[in-house]
Image (cartoon, coloured by chain):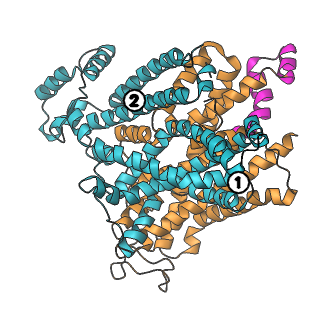
Chain colours: A orange, B cyan
Amino acid sequence: MSTMWAATPSEQLMRMATRAAGRRRSATRRRLPLYIGLAMLVLAVAAAVLAPVLVSQSPTTIDVLHPLAPPLTPGHALGTDQFGRDVLARILYGARIDLAIAFGATIVTLVGGTIIGLVAGYLGGRIDSVLMRLVDLFFAFPFLVLIIAIVAMLGPSILNMFVAIWITSWVAYARIMRAQAVVAKRQQYVLAARALGYGRLRIMFRHILPNTASAVIIFSMVDAVGNIILAASLGFLGLGAQPPSPEWGTMISEGQNYLLTSWWLATMPGLAVVFVGIAFSLVGDGLADLLRTGER
Amino acid sequence: MSRFSSLPQRCGHLVIVLFGITLVTFFLLRLLPGNPAVAILGTSYTPARAAAIDNTLGLNRPIWSQYGLFLGHLFQGNLGFSFFYGQPATTVIVQHIAPTVFLVIYSAVLAALISFPIGFAAGLRRGGVIDQSSRILFTVSFAMPGFWLGIILLLVFSVHLHAFPISGFGGGFAQHLYYLFLPALTIALGFSTVLVRSLRAATIATLQAEFVDTARMKGIRWRRVLRRHVFRNAILAVVAVFGVNLAYLISGTVLVENVFSLPGLGSLLVNSVADRDYPVVQGVTLLFAVLIVAINLLADIVQAALDPRVGQEAGA
């Protein structure tokens, strides 16, 4: 799209990630979002890894004598669900699933999309136009609907959710990286490398990629937020993780049935999603500022 | 050159994308593990019946011939037969369109009502209180799953304050407005963060335009300049924003319909996945994709009609 304001959320964020940030702030203030975000992320990962140490209950042990205990009950800081399972334990163990999706889905599409975009942008020609028509095609579908359709055909499970995200999410990276590669291939350092007789692969991966990778890396933080929400959404719709898995979206979905009496069941896992999402957003913002200044 | 000069090229792209959409939806069904006849027959499977179904569905033909058959049926409006509903898939889908369309339009209107004042205010006073707080809100709401926000609104306004119904679509226009207020608000809150950013950028860009300086130098009062020159141009931008973000709105609708149990296409899609009703899944996917492509084209045409500059940047 040519007009600067007509953009989807992901396009806006792509543009933010691509644009050189000329903001001048003091170094500490500029890095504050990055530090806060990293601290929140480390906290979330630590909570997921140390879940067995932090809570004594298992996320799946049923306690029929104490169902639907409200938060701050002794022994159950966030209360219990309809089967008497400890909500805090479930959220901490659920972090393992949701963080794995955030990292796993994001890294694969980051690498795959970056390579495709780099090749399309540098080589150009027919490969480029075929790949970019494919990207256009994926952008024509409502993202969530396409993912649901793919999961529907493969059958609902966490692995198939990964596959669906891998199939659809590389397109954003390909589009960003292609734009970067198209610009880079006319720049002096690439021309110099070509004059020296270096091969295409070497120029693409040793020269262009290190100089342009910051845009896709920053975008991947935003994408990780999207993937966490997507995983929770699919879990909520019953298309991702299946009960009794403590995946956050699945927990929210189960909790909705008890909304009239037990508000904490649906509320608490959602807060966990928001916490991790904000952490990734802040890291993305911070990285954007940091990598820009490093370039100058 | 005419202002619509880029239209033929756009239509060329459109045909390629539409062709790709049919190809993708066709192969989605072929991805299905195992034999479709087995899925359709279930427990009443016999080899003879399976062969009969293969024959009627054309499954014993080569794959390109099957695709031709699919395209041919598509042009007749035939999306296959929904064994779960015992009706043609097209009929089932048509029955579920109304709530979704109502919800999408309603939330778009609400989003405009919320974001216009905030977006303009943020653009006029960069770094001001409204600008800063809307930026923080953007960070938070970007990390918030839409369906969860819907549940929280439901918890506060329906369960505790009893201000709105918990689910349902209601009968008649006024009831629709009342029943769909919370679902539409959920989508609108998510969408308005996008709109606010776009409006803010558009307002800032317009304020720097020379015609604004000219208008001020002519001695026109500031309020009048804002109303007649700045806001009008910034609102132009929103037409494009709506077109481009339709996919985002529809994704929101799919989730929110499931939170509030609305009988729309989103609920139909998710229920059909659970019921393994593949023709309906395929049909809804196809419908959404075609709808998005068509409305994007429409938004481009409307924009070209409103703003003569748009059509001239051909090949953008």
Instruction: Work out whether A208 lies above or below A164.
Output: above
Query: Mark 2 falls on what kind of element?
Result: helix
Asked if residue A215 lies in the magenta stretch, the reply is yes
Image quadrant for the N terminus of chain A?
A: top right
Camera-nearest residue between A182 and A191:
A182
Neighbours of disc 2 within 10 Å: few (<14), some (14-19), many (20+): some
- Name the residue type under label 2: Val
The span picked out in magenta is A188-216
Q: Are marks 2 and 1 in contact (CB under 8 Å)?
A: no
- Image coords of residue A32 (percent x, y): 78, 60
Query: Mark 1 falls on what kind of element?
Result: helix
Q: Viewed as shown, does residue B255 lie left or right of B198?
A: left
- Image coords of residue B275 (percent x, y): 25, 45
Image quadrant for the C terminus of chain A?
A: top right
Q: Residue at x 54, y 19 (%)?
A: B4
Q: Which mark is residue A283?
A: 1
Q: Viewed as shown, does residue B29 lie left or right of A116?
A: left
The reply to whether residue B236 is in sight is yes
Q: Which residue is mark 2?
A: B290
Instruction: Work out whether B9 lies above or below A103.
Output: above
The reply to whether residue A217 is in sight is no
